[in-house]
Amino acid sequence: MAKKIYIIEDDANILYSLQAKFSTEGFEVKTDNGVGHILEIVNHVKMFIPQILVLDLILPKFDGFDLLHEFKRKEETKNIPIFVFTNLSDEDSKSRGLNLGADYYFIKDEFSIDQFVAKVKKIIENKEKMVSQ
């Protein structure tokens, strides 16, 4: 069964590149460009039930930190691992994201799309190995 991933990213080039790459790697992918309402996005995620969330923190209509907080606050989404993929590289943003419950924090400038997808896959595989032991 394919792993399900939900990507929230407002940059169309990055969004479609991530979607294409994760799809090629066998993931079932749903995307959101972050222009809807926070609760609408949370509801879409709750209906899709992904194993992984990729979240940009700089979104057009609201703060990605607020969305992160909302995911971790809701019973149905609080245990979904969240991979932040953002341009916010300052320490305050990073510690705020991790304190709000992000499981991983990646700076876009430090990774190509291929490197980021490979990193996410590796983390998932390592977690699965640990669980099966």
Image (cartoon, rainbow, N blue to C red):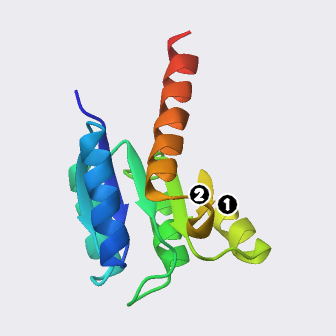
Q: Residue at (24%, 46%) from the top-left corner?
A: 23
Instruction: Classify 116 as above or below 107.
Output: above
| Direction top: furthest residue | 133
Specify whether residue 113 is in view: yes
Mark 2 sits on what residue?
102
Instruction: Classify 14 as above or below 119.
Output: below
Q: Is residue 92 left or right of residue 119?
A: right
Report, in whole angstroms, how far the alpha carbon at label 1 lies from the one at label 2: 5 Å
Q: Quadrant of the C terminus?
A: top right
Specify whether residue 43 is in view: no
Q: Residue at (32%, 67%) from the top-left corner?
A: 15
Label 1: which secondary element:
helix
Image x and y of residue 3, in percent: 30, 36
Q: Quadrant of the N terminus?
A: top left
Name the one closer to the observer, 10 or 38.
Answer: 10
Mark 1 sits on what residue?
98
Q: Residue at (50%, 67%) from the top-left corner?
A: 68
Residue 34 sits in quarter? bottom left
The amino acid type found where label 2 is placed reads: Ala
Assess whether mark 2 and mark 1 are in contact (beta carbons under 8 angstroms).
Answer: yes
Image x and y of residue 28, in percent: 22, 44
